[in-house]
Every structure is written in structure tokens, then in C-alpha cells.
Image: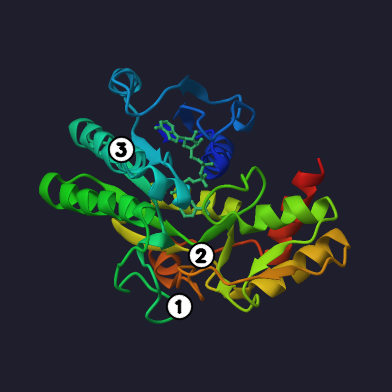
Amino acid sequence: MKVLVVGGAGFIGSHVVDALVKKGYEIVVVDNLSSGKKDFLHPGAAFYSLNILDEGFVTIFEKERPDAVFHLAAQINVQKSIENSRLDAEVNILGTLKILELCKKHDCKLIYSSSAAVYGNPVYLPVDERHPVKPLSNYGISKYTPEMYISLYSQQYDVDYTILRYANVYGPRQDAEGEGGVVSIFMKKMINNEPPIIFGNGEQTRDFIYVEDVAAANIAAMEKDCRGVFNISSNQEMTINSLVDEINSSLKTKLAPIHKKFRAGDILHSCLNNLLAQNKLGWEPRFSFKEGLKKTVDSYRQ
Ligand code: NAD
């Protein structure tokens, strides 16, 4: 079976590729290396350095004829989505629509990486898939709009799909700039003996999910015949203060955070309910936060 991983040189995409290699799939990667790195890419994957918006993408898709597509390529920086809303919409909305059209034409399953950003400010916790969708950023809108196209194409043209909404993903190869990059931002500072900066009192919470668990969820989505939207998360709230404690303990440091003013617009608490993914995809997180953090610290040390 041949699979295409779009965005396969990125943080999460490269872990999806590693997991697919272990399972013996034939893999093709398309990535324009705008934030991804060729070094992240497993040598067992065929690689095309290309923008999905380029005409050549259709040619490659039709030459390779994959059976399934993992679509992880995106403009993921929330600030950039505000500064350059057009680029954000082009890559995230039009780029996904282009892939969806190809999936429709060639009867190919689509596994789409979406985000907790689609929910906006939680009305209740933990947020399940029936929670109202109300994005607070251009980025959130650009991640949700493709979800609506995908579900419509499934109803109208029977396109097979799974949508995965990730909580804050962390792990080796994460860039400090991306969505949910707080673990890597703190890690980069603290490994250099610098204090982390917390906006607010640090009692705000996030739900951190280890990247190899996210990769496993992608594989489960491809292997199970299960259309729908699934939260991929740890189902656990962790305060930012506890995050600093955990990193201190893992690095054997005692760095006290610097507190700055809480940023207006930041979400106070975030946690996704992952029970649907457990029940329907047969997936659950395998790595505790301590285990995931240890692997992340080890990779930073290298
Ligand atoms: P990333 O930036 O590391 O990966 C994205 C990859 O897509 C990069 O390799 C980049 O070079 C590539 N890319 C971007 N635009 C492209 C284009 N036009 N053509 C071809 N390739 C292009 O980001 P990530 O954190 O690995 O995110 C992967 C997916 O997961 C994204 O869709 C993101 O929205 C989603 N997501 C991430 C998180 C998180 O915590 N990191 C949380 C929720 C959702």
C-alpha cells in the first residue's frame, strides 16, 4: 500500500513517516520545507520538495497514485495567520481543497490534521467533539473551513476521510515557533540555564500530547474504517507552573519562571476529551507526560 504524507518533513509529519516506515508502508512525501527540514525525513521515503499550491503537485499525485493521504502541511503560526491572512487561507484552505479534489478523483482516503484551535474558548471541559466550534483566530478558521469541505465531499462524493483535532503536541523536532510550542520554547531556554517566561500566574492549563502518540493516531485512522472527527489528546489538564516543574525535574535544574502580564486573547484552560478516539479508533496515548518529556529532553541534549 502506498501512502502520501503531505508535510512529512515537519515536526508531526516526520514522526508519522517514521511510524509508517516501521509498519512497512511505501511512502511518498511532499513538503516545501518552509518550516520542515530534510534532516527530519526518513531515508526510506521518496521525497518531492514542492509547494502543494504549485501545479506540479497534481502531476506528482497522479504519477504516484497513493491509496491514502496524510495531510499535515499547513501555515501553523497563529501570529502569521493574523499578519498574512491571505497566505494562511491559501495554504490551509485552498491547499486542502486541492488535495480533497484529488482524493475525490482518485478514490483516495484523506487523513486531515486539524486542531483544538477550531473550538475557541471552551464552554465546558474537557471539550468533546460536540462542543461548539468558534475559532478565535484566522488560523482556527483556516483549519476548520477544510473540515466542512471534507465532510461535504464525504456526503456528496463518498470521499473517505478521518479528521484528527490535536491538542498541544510536543516532542523531538518541534520548532519553538509553531502551534503549541510552549514545551519547546521552555525547553530551549531552560536547557541553556535561562528562566522561562510565563504570561500570567501560570495556573492556566493545557493538554499536552506526545508526538509519537499523535503519529499512532494517524495510523489508526488510516487502518480503521471510521469516518468522522476525533480529538487526539491526553485528556489531562496541566498547569503551566507544573510544566516548568516537570522540565526542571527532568533537566535537574531549579529555574524560577519570570511572570509577565497575562496576554489578552489567550485561552485560560484547554483540555480535549479523547474518549471517542479510544472507542472508535482503538487508539489511546501510550506515553505519560514524564516519558514523553524524557524523550524530548534526550533529543534536545543530542
Ligand atoms: P510543521 O510546520 O512542523 O509542519 C508542517 C509541514 O508542512 C512543514 O514541514 C512545512 O514545511 C510543510 N508545508 C507548509 N506549507 C506547505 C506548502 N504550501 N506546501 C508543502 N509543504 C508545506 O507543523 P506541525 O506542528 O508538524 O503541524 C502539522 C499539522 O498539525 C498542521 O496541519 C497543524 O495545523 C496541525 N496541528 C499541530 C499542532 C501542534 O501542537 N504542533 C496542534 C494542532 C494541530
| Image spot of residue 271 (x, y percent) | 49, 73
- Numbered tag placed on residue 90 in the rendering: 3
In the rendered structure, which amino acid carries the disc numbered 2? Ser
150 is higher (above) or lower (below) than 69: below
| Mark 2 vs mark 3, CA separation in Å | 27 Å
Check if mark 1's residue and mark 2's residue have beta carbons within 8 Å.
Answer: yes
| Image spot of residue 20 (x, y percent) | 52, 38
| Image spot of residue 223 (x, y percent) | 40, 48
In the rendered structure, which amino acid carries the disc numbered 3? Glu
Q: Residue 142 or 21: which is nearer the viewer?
A: 142
Which quarter of the figure has residue 4? top left
151 is higher (above) or lower (below) than 101: below
Q: Residue 7 or 257: which is nearer the viewer?
A: 257
Q: Residue at x 65, y 75 (%)?
A: 202
Q: Mark 1 points at which residue?
A: 126
* Pair 3/1: label in front: 3
| Mark 1 vs mark 2, CA separation in Å | 10 Å
Q: Which residue is drawn at 28% across and 35% down?
A: 99
84 is higher (above) or lower (below) than 213: above
Secondary structure at numbered mark 1? loop
Q: How crowded is mark 2: few (under 14 residues within 10 Å), some or many (20 or more)?
A: many
Q: Name the residue under label 2.
A: 233
Q: Can residue 19 be seen in this view?
A: yes
Q: Earlier in the sequence, mark 1 or mark 2?
A: 1
231 vs 197, left or right, is: left
Q: How crowded is mark 1: few (under 14 residues within 10 Å), some or many (20 or more)?
A: some
Q: Can residue 225 be seen in this view?
A: no
Check if mark 3's residue and mark 1's residue have beta carbons within 8 Å.
Answer: no
Q: Residue 136 or 166: which is nearer the viewer?
A: 136
